[in-house]
Image (tube, rainbow, N blue to C red):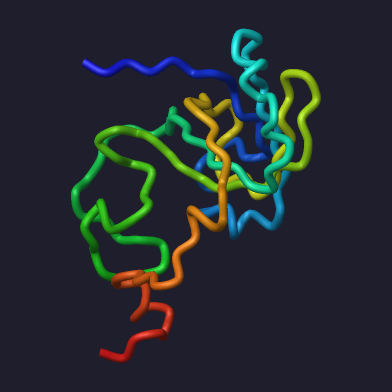
Amino acid sequence: MIEFSPIGIIHTPWQNKKEAPIQPSRSGGAEGVIEMFPEYVEGLSDLDGFSHIYLIFHFHKSEGYDLKVKPYLDTVKRGLFACRAPRRPNQIGLSIVRLDKIEGNLVYVRDVDMLDGTPLLDIKPFVGEFDGREEVRTGWLEKVRGRKTE
């Protein structure tokens, strides 16, 4: 058995799934605040030098899953693991957000796409030169977005 314990709580403007944007890039720069639990605050040291961070979190309002889903940007059912749907066997979410500032146990971020009260599992710095890729394929999205003609 695998068990995770939250290191903090993410506060956002989004109270339910219908309000929340489908991705950070579609949030319109929505602001959020991460309330770190006191025992983890020391781990925030040196994070303020990064412009973006990965948030790994628990989809706490998600229940169940289907292995085929109709993505927001498509009309065809696709395999769950080829999509970013929140209803997953392990309800783990991953988003890249902009880091604005850190004040004590509060981490101020923008581009949030998770619900208010979301349990935070981990933070990792986004490092463009390590995390960026020059040659990237985006599967079925290439056709949906008009980038592929087959």
Q: Residue furthest top?
A: 39
Question: Which residue appears at 43% of the width and 33% of the height?
Answer: 59
Asked if residue 46 shows in the view, the reply is yes
Quarter of the image where one finds residue 38: top right
Image quarter where the C terminus lies is: bottom left
Left or right: 116 in relation to 28: left
Q: Residue furthest front?
A: 129
> Residue 20 appears at what percent x and percent y?
57, 47
Asked if residue 19 shows in the view, the reply is no
Q: Is residue 6 above or below residue 17?
A: above
Image quarter where the N terminus lies is: top left
Question: Which residue appears at 69% of the width and 57% of the height?
Answer: 28
Q: Nearer the viewer, residue 68 or 133?
A: 133
Q: Nearer the viewer, residue 35 or 51?
A: 51
Left or right: 30 in relation to 63: right
For the image shown, how many numbered marks are present on the structure? Answer: 0
> Residue 54 appears at what percent x and percent y?
54, 41
Question: Which residue appears at 60% of the width and 31% of the height?
Answer: 116
> Residue 99 appears at what percent x and percent y?
70, 42
Left or right: 97 in relation to 120: right
Left or right: 140 in relation to 119: left
